[in-house]
């Protein structure tokens, strides 16, 4: 804007010179008036810039905020997992929100999410979203989730999904929810729907299948016993929303204490696609005993028909004697002699 005004003044000056003394005087007055206005505009712009960088806002804040390390506090709140420039950005943005900064400072030198109001939590993570961007956010939340979920491995796809969810309209609620779960606490009710939606979308059946396949193929026993195509197809359309709802509302619940209808989408495909007989055969082979294909099939059939699988699905350990009896009933005389010998 200033350059455009100065250019206009230059044109006026040229016109004044061309029009003679009287025109020059008039143009000179106009030039002076315009220059005064430009100076006033520049002063206003400088004042606005000063306010934008937090200088003016800082002077109006309480002393405890003025003296606080907002950069350090914001970094601590997100586990110092982001580059320094993100923390610097968050500190600068907090200066523009005095009430949020004061709430954060009041929470102490090591602020915990549950010590902050929901409005402050949402504001802090909205600032984080603006400063970090979807890629860093996705990497952070994917890694955090994978650390707390043994079943899931982090991946670029998981990170991209979480990054997208973090930048959606409900992104701050989702980020608050996942961060709260990371502190082994259930998110506030307002943050739970967005968190459940993100987990259902991002940690879907295909992600679970990929992680299981990676683990199984690294274990020779399960690699031989599992039908990998069966696992992939069984999990592909699995409805995991009930599982993630239970997880979000009670992050500390043990998996085997959850209702069967919640755990079934995870557990059922394992027993449908993994041969218990093959697992037992691998264990027996390690002791020098070879189980026939007929014995392996017998163990699989018996495990299903006797309710052994149901006991797993219900989250209860099967009786060791009962399981042993199933195996022994399936062994041939030759195999029994090898076991007994």
Image (spheres, rainbow, N blue to C red):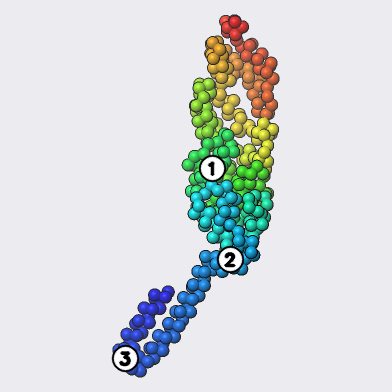
> Measured along the vertical axis of the image, is residue 166 above or below residue 39?
above
Q: Residue at x 55, y 36 (%)?
A: 152
Question: Which of the marked residues, 3 or 2, is nearer the chain's N terminus?
Answer: 3
Q: CA distance from mark 3 to mark 1?
A: 72 Å
The residue wearing badge 2 is 58
Q: Residues within 10 Å of mark 1 (few under 14, many from 20)?
A: many
Looking at this view, name the residue that lies furthest to the bottom. 22
Residue 14 position in % (x across, y down): 32, 85
Which numbered dot is residue 19? 3
**Residue 261 at least partly seen:** no
Secondary-structure class at tag 2: helix
Spot occupied by residue 303 in the image (x, y as percentages of width and height): 63, 19
Disc 3 or 1, which lies upstream in sequence? 3
Q: Which mark is residue 142?
A: 1
Residue 134 in the image: state x and y as whole percent: 50, 50
Up/down of 213 relative to 143, above or below: above
Q: Is residue 189 left or right of residue 19?
A: right
């Amino acid at each position: 804007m200033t350059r455009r005004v100065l250019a206009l003044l230059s044109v006026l000056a040229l016109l004044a010179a061309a029009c003679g003394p009287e025109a020059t005087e008039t143009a000179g007055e106009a030039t002076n008036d315009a220059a005064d206005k430009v100076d006033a505009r520049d002063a206003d712009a400088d004042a606005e810039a000063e306010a934008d960088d937090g200088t003016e806002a800082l002077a109006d804040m309480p002393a405890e905020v003025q003296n606080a390390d907002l950069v350090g506090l914001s970094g601590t709140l997100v586990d110092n997992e982001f580059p320094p420039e993100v923390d610097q950005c968050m500190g600068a943005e907090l200066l523009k929100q005095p009430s949020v900064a004061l709430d954060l400072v009041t929470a102490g030198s090591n602020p915990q999410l549950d010590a902050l109001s929901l409005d402050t939590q949402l504001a802090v993570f909205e600032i984080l979203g603006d400063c970090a961007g979807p890629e860093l956010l996705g990497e952070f939340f994917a890694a955090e989730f994978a650390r707390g979920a043994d079943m899931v491995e982090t991946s670029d796809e998981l990170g991209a999904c979480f990054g997208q969810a973090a930048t959606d309209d409900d992104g701050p609620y989702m980020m608050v929810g996942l961060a709260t779960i990371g502190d082994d606490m259930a998110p506030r009710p307002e943050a739970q729907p967005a968190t459940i939606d993100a987990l259902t979308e991002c940690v879907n059946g295909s992600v679970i299948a990929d992680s299981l396949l990676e683990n199984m193929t690294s274990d020779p026993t399960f690699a031989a016993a599992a039908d990998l195509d069966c696992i992939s197809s069984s999990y592909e359309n699995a409805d995991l929303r009930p599982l993630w709802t239970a997880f979000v509302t009670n992050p500390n619940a043990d998996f085997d204490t959850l209702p069967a209808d919640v755990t079934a989408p995870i557990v059922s495909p394992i027993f449908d696609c993994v041969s218990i007989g093959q697992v037992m055969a691998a264990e027996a082979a390690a002791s020098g005993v070879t189980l026939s294909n007929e014995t392996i099939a017998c163990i699989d059939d018996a495990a299903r028909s006797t309710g052994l699988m149901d006991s797993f699905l219900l989250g209860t350990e099967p009786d060791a004697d009962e399981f042993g009896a199933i195996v022994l009933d399936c062994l041939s005389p030759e195999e029994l002699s090898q076991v007994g010998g």
